[in-house]
Amino acid sequence: MAKVLVVEDEPLLRIVAEDVVRSLGFEAIGAGDGTQAIMLAESSPDLEVLVTDIHLGPGPTGWQVANSIRQTHPNILVIYTSGLAGADDHSRHGLRNSVFLSKPITPEELAGAIRGSLPP
């Protein structure tokens, strides 16, 4: 079962994203900020997907979280989300083999990004 780390500082959005991940048959781990996400990733060697908001309040941004986690999980799929940043920001800051989704994101969009990026 694939393990997905969902990083979102808005609790309701995080819960919805975790529910979508679980409905796809994956294990969901939630983090409310970048620091917590990095710590969870360090203790979860089997992470396959990172879904992270870009603007996480105080502490590391989603860009920084992804860069840090890629150091220990070089093959992790990264899905960035934001209602403020856009495709131009993703082209400048996003990691290779990553996806950007503009908020609001439907459960179908998130499911498609996860399913479309994981090997069968």
Image (cartoon, rainbow, N blue to C red):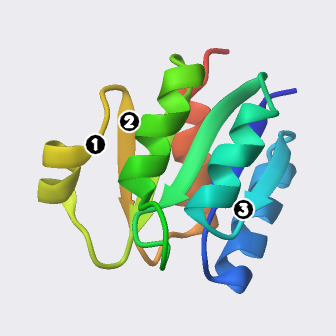
> Where does residue 97 sit, x and y in percent of width and height?
36, 26
27 sits to left or right of 118:
right
> Where does residue 87 sit, x and y in percent of width and height?
19, 56
Q: In the rendered image, which quarter is residue 88 located in?
A: bottom left
User: Which callout, 2 or 3, points at the residue further toward the start of the chain?
Assistant: 3
**Above or below, 79 relative to 14:** above
Task: Work out whether residue 94 or residue 33 is closer to the camera in this orientation and state it.
Answer: 33
Q: In the rendered image, which quarter is residue 7 located in?
A: bottom right
Q: Amino acid at mark 2?
A: Ser
Residue placed under numbered mark 3 in the picture:
31
Residue 27, labelled with which disc? none
Q: Amino acid at mark 3?
A: Ala
Residue placed under numbered mark 1 in the picture:
94
Task: Work out whether residue 117 or residue 58 is closer to the camera in this orientation and state it.
Answer: 58
**Above or below, 113 relative to 62:** above
Which of the two marks, 2 or 1, is nearer to us in this view?
A: 1
Q: Amino acid at mark 1?
A: Gly
Instruction: State the SS at label 2.
Output: strand
User: Which callout, 1 or 3, points at the residue further toward the start of the chain?
Assistant: 3
Query: Alpha-carbon distance for marks 2 and 3?
Result: 19 Å
